[in-house]
Amino acid sequence: MTESVLVVGETLVDLVPAGGNDDLFVRRMGGGPTNVAAGLARLGDAPLLWSCLGADPLADFLRRRLDAIGLLGPYIERAPESKTSLALVTHDGAGDRTFTFYRERPADVHLSVGAVPDEQLAQLDWVVVGGIALAADRARAAILDLLDRATAAGCTIVYDPNARPSLWTDKSFERTARDVLAYTDIVCGSAADCRTAGFDGETPAALAQSVLATGVHTVVLTQGGDGSLLRATANSPVGPTAIDHPGYSVAVTDTTGAGDAFLAGLLDGIVGGADDPWHWLDQGNAAGALTTTARGAVSAFPDAAAIEALQNEQSIGRR
């Protein structure tokens, strides 16, 4: 386990169709932040994960899965009176998914202020945050407290504005996104999620500039089958940068977790020390594309060898 990266947010159970049969569902570990942590573990060292589990049989399943991939660390809290959240995943003909959430006394909202101590933050370089835990008052307060202390400790903050509109009321997602962005250095998310957060722009490039205007130094927008782009200001470690990546061509089966795999691939390139942002985007796009070729998010995440094979096969040049 690497102690340079902390990923923050919910761990839940995804119920996904088994073998394309919408009458039969199987359980999979899920939750955007946990997916990102699992993707990083698949590509190299497992990061630290700050999350919360309940005490029901589904929580026992999640605990076993976290342990198996090296994520059952010191910051997995326990909420004995709470239940594991469920996300029912359904798909359209193109493999795009829709989530229906079932959250009765959800365990993932029980993050405690100060659970990750200042001594740990002093050892970190990166904090990655996003997901639906931010929709709950208690978890949001704990996460914002962590971001404040992590910023003071010199950590780089990465935010995925992972919108799930059914879990937010009125303008609460937009307000929360602005609160998190006050601490954020790098935004990585879909163009649709950024628009839900209240940003605008007729083109993806203009949308990225709208997000940069908040003071973050780097924005990465994912665009599904159309690839991704990166825009960075002079405050970024790579300086003013504009890169567009067309994405990889694959046969899509299930898009569940593709954005999380993209972020894991991107972060693995950045945290691993690659100084070329084209490499970050290329690795993120390859990871996200490969994840769509099989069902089930984490179970479909590629390893470094699979990413390299796709990169060698399609040989996409820098744009």
Image: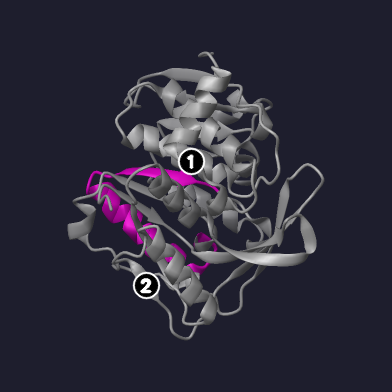
Q: Who comes first in sequence, dot 1 or dot 2?
A: 2
Q: Main secondary structure of the magenta part?
A: helix
Q: Is residue 294 above or below residue 310?
A: below
Of the pair 54 and 209, the residue shown nearer to us: 54
Tell me: 31 left or right of 3: right
Residue 265 lies within the magenta run: no
Q: Is residue 309 above or below residue 156?
A: above
Residue denoted by label 1:
263
Position of residue 198 measured from the top left corner of the image (x, y, whole percent) = 61, 43
Position of residue 269 measured from the top left corner of the image (x, y, whole percent) = 38, 32
Tell me: 17 left or right of 204: right
Q: Which residues are magenta?
A: 134-161
Q: Is residue 31 above or below residue 302?
A: below
Position of residue 183 measured from the top left corner of the image (x, y, whole percent) = 37, 46
Q: Quadrant of residue 19?
A: bottom right
Please report the residue visible at 35 percent of the width from the left and 43 percent of the height from the top.
Answer: 44
Tell me: 296 left or right of 22: left
Residue 197 shows in this picture: yes
Tell me the crowding category of disc 1: few under 14, some 14 to 19, or many 20 or more residues within 10 angstroms, Cα based.
Answer: many
Residue 150 lies within the magenta run: yes
Residue denoted by label 2:
77
Please report the residue visible at 50 percent of the width from the left and 28 percent of the height from the top.
Answer: 309
Of the pair 81 and 44, the residue shown nearer to us: 44
Tell me the crowding category of disc 2: few under 14, some 14 to 19, or many 20 or more residues within 10 angstroms, Cα based.
Answer: some
